[in-house]
Structure formats: C-alpha cells, structure tokens
C-alpha cells in the first residue's frame, strides 16, 4: 500500500489531527464487539494465571480455545471446531459462562469448571454469535481501512524509552501509517478530549517492546479507539495496550504480564502468562437515529450535524408498519450490536416493536415485528440482544400498572421476564448496563433492578434526587462507566454509578442557553450528550418540529449546546423532525 504526504516524526513529536465526517454504517464492529478475545482464522491460546474479561461480558472465541492453568474469565468460551479437541480449560481455571463447541471435545482440568455448563452439541446460539463476529470483524477491518485519513504519518520507530504523542481533534479521527515499532519502555500517547475518537490504520505491524505502553490522555477512553492493523500485533512482556486491536489479517502475540484495556480481535491469538484484558465495548459513533412520534418515521443524521439539515436516511411509508397520526407513531428507538434498528410503535389499540435491517431506508418492511402490549414508552437492548420496553400501563392510574418487559434475542423474541411494580412504577424510559441490570426513568425517581428480575420485586437501588434537584425523569441513558443520565422536564441530570437514595447529581444542564425544551429521550456516545426535545423548534402546522441538542459530556450549568439539529421558522424545514421522542447513536 502506498501512502503519501507523510508528516515527519521524531521522538516526542505531537501531531494535531483534524476530525472527519463519516458515512453511516462504515466500520462498525458488529457482533465482534462482544468479544474480549477473538481469533477470526484460527485458535486462541492463553497462558497461565490470566484474567480475561472478569466481568460478565467479553466473550472468548476461535476455532479452538485453550486456557492455561489458574486462568479465569467472567464470560463464555466458544470454539467453532466440529471435531478433535475444541476447548481445553487448564487446572484450576474458571469460566463463569458456558463452554461451547461446534462438536469438538471439551476438556476440563483438575479443579476447573465452566460454571454455566458445557455444550458440544453444535447447535448452541453462541456459535452463531461467533460466526457473525468473524464476518463482522473482516468487514470492519476493510471498511475502516478504506476511510479517507485525516492525516498520513511516517512509520513510528521509537528507541528504548522513547515517546511520541498523537493529538486527536474533537470528532472522528482516522490516522494512517505504515507501521509502529516501540522499543522497551517506550510510550505512545494518544491525546484527545472526551469527544475525540477514531481509528488508527496501521498498514503493517504494530509492535511494542517489553514494558512499552500505549497511553491515553485528555479524556479519550479505550472504548473510543480501534487499532486497525494490517499485519501482526506483537506485545512484549508487561506491555500495556489501550483500545481494541483489530488485526483480522494477521496474528496477535503477547508476552507475560500484558494488559489490554479493550479487546484483541486477530487471525490467531497467543498470550503468555498473567495476561489481563479489561474488556470495553469499542464504539465509534457515526449516526444519530431519531424516532418521531407525531409522524410515522425514523430519521437519521450523521454525527456532527447541526442546523437546518436534511436527514441522511428516512424510514417511512406503508410497508414500514409505522403508525401515522398525533401520538401514534414510533415511541422509542434502539440498536443492536449489528446495527439493526428497533422502533417502538403505537396504534390506537396496541404497541409493537418493528425491527429494520442495518442501513434500512425508505418504505421498507420490518425484518421482525413483536407485539408489545399497550402504552409503551422507551426501549433498550442488552449486549446479548435481549429487548427491554417500559410501559405506563393501560389504566387510569398508570403508577398502579406500570411494568418493564424483557424479550429474548432468539428467533420469535419470546417473552422472558416482566417486572411489575404495583403502585411503584410509572416508567417512561429504560436502559441496561453491561451486567444486565435494568435502569428505569420513573418520573419522580430512578429505579435499578437486578439482571433477570421478574414479578413484583424491589429495586436494588433507587435515586430520589435532593431538594434542589427534584426528578421528573423521562428518558435515561448510561455512559461507559455506568454513570446515569436522565432528561427531566427542562434539564439533564447526571448521577454517579451506584448512586441510591437522596443524592445530588454530579452535574445538571439547565437554563435558557441550553435550548432544552420538553425533552423525551437521551443518548450518550463519543463524549457527547444527545437530547431529543419534543418542542422548542418551529411550528409544523398542528405539530411541533422539536429539535436535537448536543452537549459535551462534561457539561454542567446553563451552557449552550455544541450542535443543534432544528429547522428555522423563516424558511423551509429540512430536518423532517416531528416531535422527536426517541434517540439512539449507532456506528
């Protein structure tokens, strides 16, 4: 591959990199983002005393998988091999999830276990997840590699103890360079604010010596960075890696004591002892999805849009089955790991969920339709693709019959659980964290229910707010650290992860400069807060156009948004917003 226009590089040099606009659906990891370690063209071999994704997320998968002695993972292990030895779990190793193979044998060592069971029948749904992840990883590597770079760089070749810094601008950054080699103890610093994210396309090898480190500075987090490597990725003893490594066409090897904050997605993966991965779900936001409940449509806009902008895509028409009419259209919107779109829909008689394929646009039929009771407000999906909806109930006193319903990701989407908060629930929004815990915007409070809850069960946490910041919670969202954000009647409030009781928010966005006006929903992505405002825009006949306001994630007080999607009253409205009440951000 020939690269031109390289900037010069010496140890300690800093590059300032401009952001770039991206087309929708380019480079998303899809099902591959569910894996902490994934071998796309061979096996996974992990050494002794390793800790791989200690939480309940971050799968391990490949043709074969070998865990050394004394190793552990909080998720499932999946091997596609249909014969011979598919999975080997060493002595004293623990897998909190399942051990699943395509038919090959599963060998469990002394004092070892696969806590959720063994399955080598070749029919487990996790095998489909593995297959999809392999294909999605290849697509992501190709699509990210084809993006126009914001800057081309010469090879990075650092001596022992050397350092280099790459500074990222706000928004999406695409760095392109032939190779990276960092000697023992060297440092590569990625310097970007909280709203910076992107891909570093390395055409050749990425190599870190013993004790070499990739570090993040300025607010950017590991989930906002993908190292797209065309060759092999090699990490010496005690090396530190921040971000997801995607080396679909090459192999990943790591020495002893390597730490990865992110994931390893490579042709094959082989690590030494004491490997640790702190899995983060890699997410590079590209598209804003909005449900408009006063018009039977879903509108989409590129991330970074502002002003009187036309949508990049619209789902609308008879074939979509989305209802048309005041207060009858889509109620909430969410995306799964593959980018499929789930729009709540309300008719005079019932509610439904209409699912559309990733990239859908125009008058297209849904790929799935789920009956969803009545009076639904809010929808969320967990990492496994299970669907959660909030209902205020079809009764005179909604708090007496509100509920949260969970549907399976499996074919047909059968009902799994229903939380019945008799006299307690009046939910208008729902979110799910990485552990499957369920967060409910419940008007005067926020309630958190344990994963798998069903029936009339008490919450494990309840945020009431304080005297200065009373809640009127309508919509709810979580950031990567599980901090809790809600939209209220005229504000956005943020609470610390794990909060409960009468607590003050960490931050409040409120005041005339904010342009918040009757907000219904909120989303967090790429260091930004996105708010769907039901009013505040120009009049659209008998309807209100509304607006989408965007803030830095660190915002607090009476601050102006950094972007606003809204049509002016003096000229034709191009946005096609009609009382936006649901919002989701996709890659």
Image (spheres, rainbow, N blue to C red):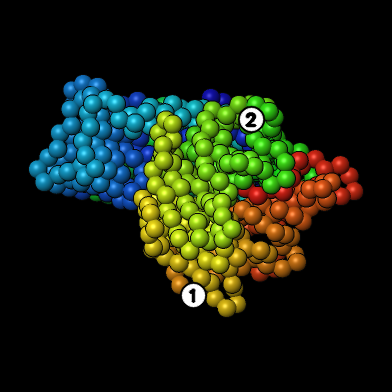
Q: Locate residue 550, reporting x and y percent.
A: 67, 54
Q: Residue at x 51, y 35 (%)?
A: 370
* Left or right of 187, for residue 166: right
Towards the viewer: 21 or 92: 92
In the rendered structure, find residue 320 and report the number of the disc placed on it: 2
* Left or right of 166, for residue 363: right
Q: Which label lies toward us, 1 or 2?
A: 2
Task: Spot the residue most to the bottom.
Answer: 467
Q: Is residue 487 visible?
A: yes
Q: Residue at x 57, y 78 (%)?
A: 467
Query: From what the image shows, is residue 249 above or below residue 528?
Result: above
Q: Are marks 1 and 2 in contact (CB under 8 Å)?
A: no
Q: Mark 2 packing: few (<14 Cα in 10 Å), some, or many (20+)? A: many
Query: From what the image shows, is residue 508 above or below residue 519?
Result: below
Q: Locate residue 219, reporting x and y percent.
A: 53, 57
Q: Residue at x 39, y 58 (%)?
A: 456
* Left or right of 53, for residue 289: right
Residue 3's quadrant in the figure?
Answer: top right
In the rendered structure, find residue 502 and report the number of the disc placed on it: 1
Q: Locate residue 535, reporting x and y percent.
A: 74, 55
In the rendered structure, find residue 122 and report the number of the disc placed on it: none
């Amino acid at each position: 591959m020939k690269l031109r226009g390289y900037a010069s590089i010496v140890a300690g040099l800093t590059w300032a990199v401009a952001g770039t606009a991206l087309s929708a659906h380019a480079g998303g990891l899809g099902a591959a983002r569910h894996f902490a370690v994934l071998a796309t063209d061979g096996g996974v071999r992990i050494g002794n005393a390793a800790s791989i994704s200690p939480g309940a997320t971050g799968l391990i998968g490949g043709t074969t998988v070998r865990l050394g002695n004394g190793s552990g993972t909080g998720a499932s292990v999946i091997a596609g091999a249909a014969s011979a030895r598919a999975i080997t779990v060493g002595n004293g190793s623990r897998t909190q999830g399942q051990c699943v193979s395509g038919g090959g044998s599963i060998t469990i060592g002394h004092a070892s276990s696969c806590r959720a069971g063994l399955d080598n029948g070749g029919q487990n749904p996790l095998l489909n997840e593995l297959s999809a992840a392999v294909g999605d990883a290849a697509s992501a590597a190709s699509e990210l590699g084809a993006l126009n770079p914001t800057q081309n760089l010469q090879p990075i070749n650092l001596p022992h103890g050397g350092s280099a810094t790459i500074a990222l601008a706000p928004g999406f950054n695409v760095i392109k360079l032939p190779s990276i080699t960092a000697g023992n103890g060297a440092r590569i610093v990625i310097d970007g604010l909280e709203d910076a994210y992107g891909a570093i396309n390395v055409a050749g090898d990425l190599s870190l010596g013993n004790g070499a480190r990739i570090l993040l500075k300025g607010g950017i987090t590991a989930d906002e960075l993908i190292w797209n490597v065309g060759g092999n990725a090699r990490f010496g003893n005690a090396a530190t890696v921040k971000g997801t490594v995607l080396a679909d066409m090459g192999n990943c090897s790591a020495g002893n004591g390597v730490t990865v904050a992110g994931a390893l997605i490579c042709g094959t993966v082989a690590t030494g002892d004491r490997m640790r991965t702190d899995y983060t779900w890699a997410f590079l936001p590209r598209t804003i999805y909005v449900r408009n409940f006063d018009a039977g449509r879903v509108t989409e806009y590129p991330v970074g849009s502002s002003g009187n902008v036309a949508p990049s895509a619209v789902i609308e028409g008879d074939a979509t089955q989305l209802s048309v009419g005041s207060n009858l259209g889509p109620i909430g919107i969410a995306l799964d790991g593959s980018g499929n779109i789930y729009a709540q829909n309300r008719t005079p008689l019932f509610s439904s969920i209409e699912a559309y394929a990733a990239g859908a646009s125009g008058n297209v039929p849904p790929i799935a339709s789920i009956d969803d009771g009545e009076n639904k407000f809010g929808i969320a999906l967990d990492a496994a693709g299970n669907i959660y909806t909030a209902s205020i109930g079809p009764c005179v006193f909604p708090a007496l019959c509100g509920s949260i319903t969970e549907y399976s990701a499996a074919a047909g989407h059968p009902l799994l659980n229903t939380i019945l908060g008799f006299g307690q629930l009046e939910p208008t929004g729902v979110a799910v964290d990485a552990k499957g815990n369920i967060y409910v915007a419940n008007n005067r409070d926020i309630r958190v229910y344990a994963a798998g809850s069903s029936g009339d069960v008490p919450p494990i946490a309840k945020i009431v707010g304080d005297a200065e910041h009373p809640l009127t919670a309508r919509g709810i969202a979580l950031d990567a650290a599980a901090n809790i954000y809600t939209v209220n009647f005229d504000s956005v409030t943020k609470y610390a992860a794990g909060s409960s009781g009468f607590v003050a928010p960490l931050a409040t966005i409120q005041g005339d400069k904010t342009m918040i006006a009757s907000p219904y929903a909120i989303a967090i992505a790429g260091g930004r807060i996105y708010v769907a405002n039901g009013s505040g825009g120009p009049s659209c006949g008998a309807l209100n156009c509304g607006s989408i306001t965007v803030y830095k994630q660190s915002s607090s007080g009476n601050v102006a948004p950094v972007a606003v999607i809204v049509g002016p009253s003096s000229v034709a409205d191009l946005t096609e917003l009609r009382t936006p009440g649901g919002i989701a951000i996709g890659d």
